[in-house]
Image (cartoon, rainbow, N blue to C red):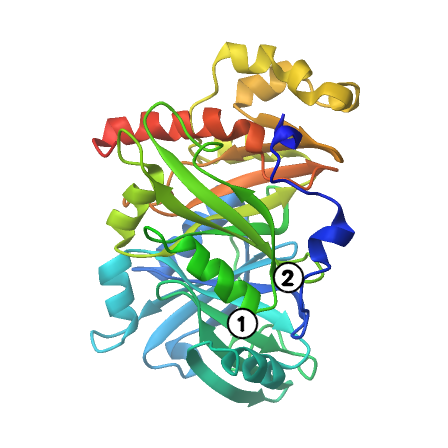
Amino acid sequence: MSKKIESVNYGLEKIFEGAQDFLPLLGTDYVEFYVGNAKQSAHFYKTAFGFQSYAYRGLETGAKDSVSYVLTQDKIKIILTTPLNSKSPINDHIVKHGDGVKIVALWVEDARKSYEETTKRGAKSYMEPTVEKDEFGEVVRAGIYTYGETVHMFVERKNYKGAFLPGFQKWESNYNPPTSGLKYIDHMVGNVGWNQMNKWVKFYEDVMGFVNFLSFDDKQIHTEYSALMSKVMSNGNGRIKFPINEPAEGKKRSQIEEYLDFYEGAGVQHIAMATDDIIKTVSQLKANGIEFLSTPPEEYYRAVPGRLEEHSHELREDIEKLKGLGIMIDADEEGYLLQIFTKPVEDRPTLFFEIIQRMGARGFGAGNFKALFESIEREQAKRGTL
């Protein structure tokens, strides 16, 4: 069980006492993807994941160089953006990385102060504080770079009453399939290159005021063939969690190396979205055509009661139903969690999604790492990239 990993400490007071919450961050505002065809991508995320039409910016709203569709599901907002001509710098990102996450936007009370606090601590500027206005008020945004070409955008919207951002209009659509029960973004994982993890851990500590509250090394995260290292960074109030992965030496090529090769650099590896009913959510996602990693072997599920230890009597879900869907189970001192991972959602084996339900646990499924990575390796073997 994951609580036996010595580097894990779940005492919240101790976890966050070292955080300098000088921004502070109120939550995730939106995640923006640069994609090759936003219209078709929007249809995919609506049909497959149950997102809803929310806002739009394009030629019809006066935008000349790009088009953006905003989708929502409960507290989750994603933007899908595509360039409208060959001169747009967005093309460079898509050509190099394929469809991927460009902006992780963070909701703040004061975007100017957030920008000032982070840039004076060494952050590289992406966008100086900019006031955007329309008849519904104003939004202040400012951005800094993090790993690779990924950006953190600070969004201050306390003086805005519009649908999303100035320049967007409400997106009305006759096609809004049922939601799948996704509630909010639990965490987002970044993959960085060899020997780069500690550099970015220090960035989040020094520049963003985050604290490293979970660490896993290659002795804890490995299979027969590959290994990786990971550290989880969290802001002061615990609302924003960014695990950071780097490759480690192994007999064959790890999933992190595969990602870095095909994404051609560091970037967001996966987005974990929370649900209150993972059995219902995953059942619907599968019916919608979402492909998940292969189910762990029978012995994995036979061992579940022993791995849950004192939490085994708390398990509300039927193990046979979990097994039938391939959902994994883990626990720590504070409860248990249920999780499952999609296959990459595009042709490059890069970005994928995690569906997670927390029943008290604050960890990240350390007890599932071996089964998860073996499943990923089976997919790598099919692709010839292991």
Q: Quadrant of residue 54?
A: bottom right
Q: Residues within 10 Å of mark 2 (few under 14, many from 20)?
A: many
Residue shown at 55% from the left, 18% from the top: 324
Between the C-alphas of marks 1 and 2, the distance is: 11 Å
Q: Position of residue 238 (x, y in %)?
A: 69, 56
Mark 1 residue type? Val
Quadrant of the drawing holding the C terminus:
top left
Mark closer to the observer (1, 2) = 1
Residue 78's spot in the image, x, y percent?
Answer: 51, 60
Q: Which residue is mark 1?
A: 207
Tell me if residue 309 comes above or below residue 49 in the rendering.
Answer: above
Query: What residue is rendered at 65% in x and 74% in y?
Result: 23
Vertical order, 37 against 319 (above or below): below
Instruction: Point out which mark residue 33 bears.
Output: none
Residue 49 is at least partly visible in this image? yes
Horizontal side, residue 135 vs residue 245: left or right: right
Foreground of the two, 277 or 27: 27
Where residue 316 appears, x then y in whole percent? 75, 23
> Mark 2 sits on what residue?
235
Q: Earlier in the sequence, mark 1 or mark 2?
A: 1
| The N terminus - image quarter | top right
Residue drawn at x 21%, y 78% is 87
Characterize the local packing of mark 1: few (<14), some (14-19) or many (20 or more) Cα atoms within 10 angstroms.
some
